[in-house]
Amino acid sequence: MTVRRFAWIVAAALCGAASVYSQQPASGTAAPDLSPVSNPVSGAVKAQLPRFQKNMVAAAEAMPAEKYNFKPTPEMNSFAHLVMHIAQSNNGLCSKVSGMAAPDAKLADTDPKDKLVAALKASFEYCATALDKVDDSKLGDQMILFGNRPFSRAAVLIILSDDWYDHYGAEATYLRLNGILPPTAQPRKD
């Protein structure tokens, strides 16, 4: 790997590029701007939101309603519980990091697919609004999460991002176990 290619991959990753390996500068073009960015932490999380919203909602929509009770093993959560949990996590974490009141979404893992998918969509829309005014100026501010554990605002943003990766991976696994190709594994339509 050339130094130029490595620099481009790092820059693309820091800017939140969706696929750093499939996009590369054309031969003979100038190197990307590597000047410092403002709000690198909150900006990176906000840049991830549309991609995860698209893929996680598409995964929830792809699972047939009759499979929402599917559990890979009896001890694991159902797919319905996973979708409910994602919506609740989005609402809770985005509320914490932004200081904006979370929606009062009453959900149960026994709710029908259409209600859970609607709640998931609404949670991402809420996060987009809640995160809109979040910047890196208060990353060191402490807040209480998970009962009584202190976390910095930066940590909560990282937890939110980690949750999106973890939860989409779980959705993809549940789909594959039911013979359904996850959204990110489907052939491109362009």
Image (spheres, grey):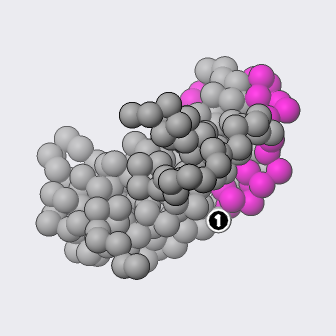
Whether 140 is drawn above or below 125: the answer is: above
Task: Name the residue carrying label 1.
Answer: 125
Q: Is residue 83 left or right of residue 30?
A: left
In the image, what residue occupies the spot 15% across and 57% down? Answer: 177
Q: Is residue 21 left or right of residue 179?
A: right
Q: Foreground residue, 3 or 44?
A: 3
Q: Foreground residue, 166 or 45?
A: 45
Whether 1 is drawn above or below 180: the answer is: above
Quadrant containing the N terminus in the rendered view: top left
Q: Is residue 108 left or right of residue 146?
A: left
State which quadrant residue 189 falls in. Answer: bottom left
Quadrant containing the C terminus in the rendered view: bottom left
In the image, what residue occupies the spot 29% across and 56% down? Answer: 172
State which quadrant residue 134 falls in. Answer: top right
Percent of width and height locating residue 91: 62, 52
Percent of width and height locating residue 126: 68, 61
Residue at disc 1, secondary structure:
helix
Percent of width and height locating residue 44: 64, 43
Whether residue 45 can be seen here: no
Q: Hey, what amino acid is under mark 1?
A: Glu
Q: Where does the magenta region start and end?
A: 126-148
